[in-house]
Amino acid sequence: MRVLFCLLLIICCTSCTYFSSDKNKGQQSLDTIINFNKVDVFPSFAECKDKIDEAKTSCFRETIHRKIADNLSQHHLEIKKEIDAIVTVELEISTEGKFILKKINSSENIREQLPKLDSLLEVSVNTLPKIFPAIKRGIPVATQYSLPIRIQLKE
């Protein structure tokens, strides 16, 4: 009985931690949640490089709209009826900073009246200069960008 009591006392005094693995004792626990829907640094043109955060994002949007509008304004477009609509251009900006046209969403009315608009937008996107890509955790990443373009033409 005495031996059984000593054995039971020894078992109760020893902890289960002696049997656990010590692999992670030296490592710091990592509880960082990474949001893959946002980038740390927004893509930017050379003229927007020195701006910070919201100013850089705003500069990027204004510059891309201006460059595409300048390119489209060089072409004479004839229409039958007045147009005031928004065309959405889906772009990808690669890790090298190149623009890749993914899709153009436009109404049936615009496609009927301006059948060349898709090819003009494609040329406009292809003539955009190379930019600095978006950065996530210090690594250049590809990003997708939806660019709404307002088409406003009068007879």
Image (cartoon, rainbow, N blue to C red):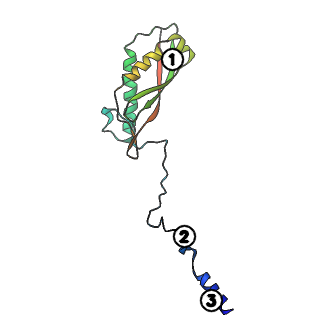
Q: Earlier in the sequence, mark 1 or mark 3?
A: 3
Q: Mark 1 points at which residue?
A: 84
Rounded to the nearest angstrom, the CA distance separating label 2 from label 1 is 70 Å
**For this rendering, which residue is in front, 67 or 143?**
143
Mark in the foreground, 2 or 1: 2
Secondary element at image label 1: strand
Q: Mark 2 points at which residue?
A: 20
**Which disc number belongs to residue 6?**
3
User: Which residue is painted at 55% across and 73% down in the image?
Assistant: 19
User: Which residue is painted at 37% across and 46% down in the image?
Assistant: 138
Look at label 1 and name its amino acid. Asp
Q: Earlier in the sequence, mark 2 or mark 3?
A: 3
Residue density around tag 2, few if under 14, some if 14–19, many if 20 or more, within 10 Å: few
User: Which residue is painted at 40% across and 19% down in the image?
Assistant: 123
Rounded to the nearest angstrom, the CA distance separating label 1 from label 3 is 91 Å
Question: Residue 64 appears at what percent x and percent y?
Answer: 39, 27
Look at label 2 and name its amino acid. Ser
Secondary element at image label 2: loop
